[in-house]
Amino acid sequence: MIIAVDGPTASGKGTIAAALARHYALPHLDTGLLYRAVGYQCAASGGDPDRVDDAVLACGFPDALLADPELRNEATGGLASRVSVHPAVRQCLFQRQRVFALQPGGAVLDGRDIGTVIAPEAEAKLFVIASVEARARRRFAEMQEQGRDVSMADIAAELAARDERDRKRAEAPLVAAPDAVLLDTSELSRDAAIAAAIAMVEAARKGRTDRL
Ligand code: DC
């Protein structure tokens, strides 16, 4: 079974995807991490993330980079969003994601375009959303836990800028697949969001079996 979990940054999609992977004993790929690695590598090697040639060159990042905690910070998220605008970068990362999705037994992938581009045939598609306030609150708590000194206002502004860029890009913009189910986590606890996601996957599976 392929499960696609898409949605904006800090919506809870990563937590939900990881929990679904555990629940169904499936491998999980956080596809945002690939774009983060490209953005980070590009900037670290003196490139300009807005220049397609520099961004494509950074697609050859070493796999070890994926474990670097620097990839998780907000600044790298911004770089990722900038390199992800280039169709050539998306093309470079396509095969890796597609192969992961098609492995025997299935997989859970989370990102922005899993249900629309990477695995349109996914059995279950979730589009996870949350209000900007809820997302900024969560990101702020995360940053505080990591001992990072950032203001709530800066986080909210960065989230809004990232959403705008991810939604408006010409190729594979952040948009729910027509057959995706919407999960709004604004008012849900972590456990309640996970329980709702499992129920949605079960409903999608049942719907498919009923149609057979
Ligand atoms: O999910 P994330 O915050 O780690 O993603 C970082 C950026 O990467 C996001 O702003 C847009 C880009 N991205 C993408 O374009 N397509 C994906 N499937 C995943 C992430």
Image (cartoon, helix red, strand yellow):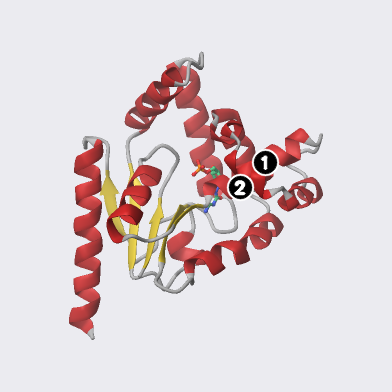
Q: Residue furthest bottom?
A: 212
- 33 left or right, relative to 2: right
Callout 1: SS: helix
Q: Is residue 49 visible?
A: no
Residue at the location (71% across, 48% down)?
Answer: 62
Which residue matches tag 2?
35
**For mark 1, does the 10 Å Cα neighbourhood hold few (<14), some (14 to 19), or many (20 or more) residues?**
many
Q: Which mark is residue 39?
A: 1
Residue at the location (27% across, 44% down)?
Answer: 184
Is residue 34 placed above or below 39 in the rendered structure?
below
- 136 left or right, relative to 56: left
- 190 left or right, relative to 92: left
How far across and down, in percent of the image, does residue 174 sit? 48, 52
How far across and down, in percent of the image, does residue 5 sit? 38, 55
Question: Disc 2 to disc 1, how far (Cα)?
Answer: 6 Å
**For mark 2, does the 10 Å Cα neighbourhood hold few (<14), some (14 to 19), or many (20 or more) residues?**
many
Using the image as rendered, state which of residue 103 and residue 161 is in the foreground: 103
Amino acid carrying label 1: it is: Gly
Residue at the location (38% across, 22% down)?
Answer: 141
Residues at discs 2 and 1 in contact (Cβ within 8 Å):
yes
Is residue 182 placed above or below 129 in the rendered structure?
below
Q: Is mark 2 within 8 Å of ligand 1?
A: yes
Callout 2: SS: helix
Amino acid carrying label 2: it is: Tyr
Q: Is mark 1 within 8 Å of ligand 1?
A: yes
Q: Is residue 57 visible?
A: yes
